[in-house]
Amino acid sequence: MTINNVMVIGAGQMGAGIAQVCAQSGFQTFLHDMNEAALNKGITSIERLLARSVEKERMTETEMKETRNRLKPAVSINDASKCDLVIEAVVENMAVKAKVFQQLDEITPEHTILASNTSSLPITEIASATNRPSQVIGMHFMNPVPVMKLVEIIRGLQTSEETYQAIREMTHQLQKTPVEVADFPGFVSNRILMPMINEAIFTLYEGVASPEDIDTVMKLGMNHPMGPLQLADFIGLDTCLYIMEVLHEGFGDSKYRPCPLLRKYVKAGWLGKKSGRGFYQYD
Ligand code: CAA
Ligand code: NAD
């Protein structure tokens, strides 16, 4: 199957990054968000990163303009009717994602593949919101998308071989490395990463060390590029909490219980870098 036109839904940090790499790789890319301000912010952030790539000589001025021309802000989700692939990157919540997939199932042509960038939710359940479960798949990009090479690919119970091969091929076209993982809560990445972040939050909660010191231990002691609390702020504390809840419920094991401090911060609206306050303060 040939993929030419792509729609990305959700213009937050992940959706904007995914739309950027799609447009850079030659795909006609629609970016949609239900919130127009978020859509404009997403487009502005892509334009800033493209300009930075020109500055750094990773891209020519002409390539930047061509990329920008392939990128189309879509105020309405109905533009999905023109697309061969839709990649959903809205909030990590099953009810919200299921509603988006139901809508997409009605709007898009029969051949269109519907992919989710979910961090942890079951692809089989997302697929069951549609009448085309064989064309639903997980395409899990890592943050920041333009920099990180990995895409976890997750087949739902009924995902067809044709869908899987098309998405694998597309991932290579995006200059990323696909790794196929099974449809288990948190897949591989977040089953391992998120309990480490949650444990770092417990370490802070129990007064073992300050945020700065916890992060310094993991950066200098384990050579991680970011400390776990800095990384949690970068991912978004709401997303971290949703993922821990999916692991906790999905495995039914108390070792995945979210730290109460994480819950408290999310309730306070301290969502990390995107809201200006998390474990650290941002301008
Ligand atoms: N978007 C796009 N590009 C970015 C970026 C962003 N948000 N942040 C940094 N970059 C680019 C910069 O442009 C820079 O390149 P240039 O200077 O050549 O333009 C390059 O990345 C390196 O950036 P910096 O020098 O500013 O900083 P750094 O060396 O510390 O690297 C980092 C930044 C790549 C983010 C690095 O700190 C890192 O790898 N952190 C860990 C990231 C990680 O673990 N990601 C996975 C999160 S989990 C996930 O995604 C799954 C999930 O479901 C939650
Ligand atoms: P975000 O909060 O930055 O952005 C989400 C965007 O989706 C917002 O702009 C919001 O307005 C929009 N949105 C919400 N409901 C919508 C709907 N029904 N229709 C259209 N737009 C809608 O979130 P994010 O960090 O970009 O995460 C998005 C998805 O990607 C989540 O499923 C998350 O788990 C996953 N993910 C996140 C990371 C990360 O590091 N943050 C990494 C990999 C995957």
Image (cartoon, grey):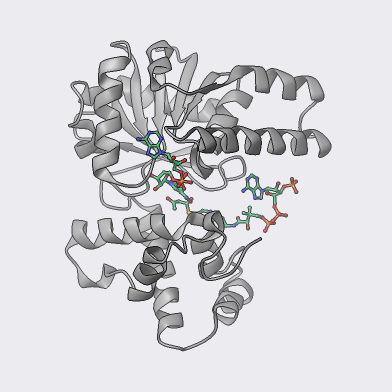
Total marks placed: 0
Q: Quadrant of residue 110?
A: top left
Q: Quadrant of residue 64?
A: top right
Residue positioned 25% across, 49% down in the render: 184
Q: Quadrant of ligand 2?
A: top left
**Residue 19 visible in the picture:** yes
Residue positioned 58% across, 79% down in the render: 217
Residue positioned 17% across, 32% down in the render: 128
Q: Quadrant of residue 109?
A: top left
Residue positioned 62% across, 44% down in the render: 147
| The C terminus: image quadrant | bottom right
Q: Nearer the viewer, residue 275 or 107?
A: 275
Q: Is 187 drawn above or below residue 174 in the view shown?
A: below
Q: Is 155 drawn above or below residue 166 in the view shown?
A: below
Q: Is 278 drawn above or below residue 9 in the view shown?
A: below
**Residue 160 visible in the picture:** no
Q: Nearer the viewer, residue 186 or 48?
A: 48
**Image coordinates for residue 249, horizontal then vertical, percent:** 19, 59
**Image coordinates for residue 82, horizontal then vertical, percent:** 42, 11
| The N terminus: image quadrant | top left
**Image coordinates for residue 149, horizontal then vertical, percent:** 56, 42
**Image coordinates for residue 199, horizontal then vertical, percent:** 39, 74
Seen in the image, is 137 located left or right of residue 6?
left
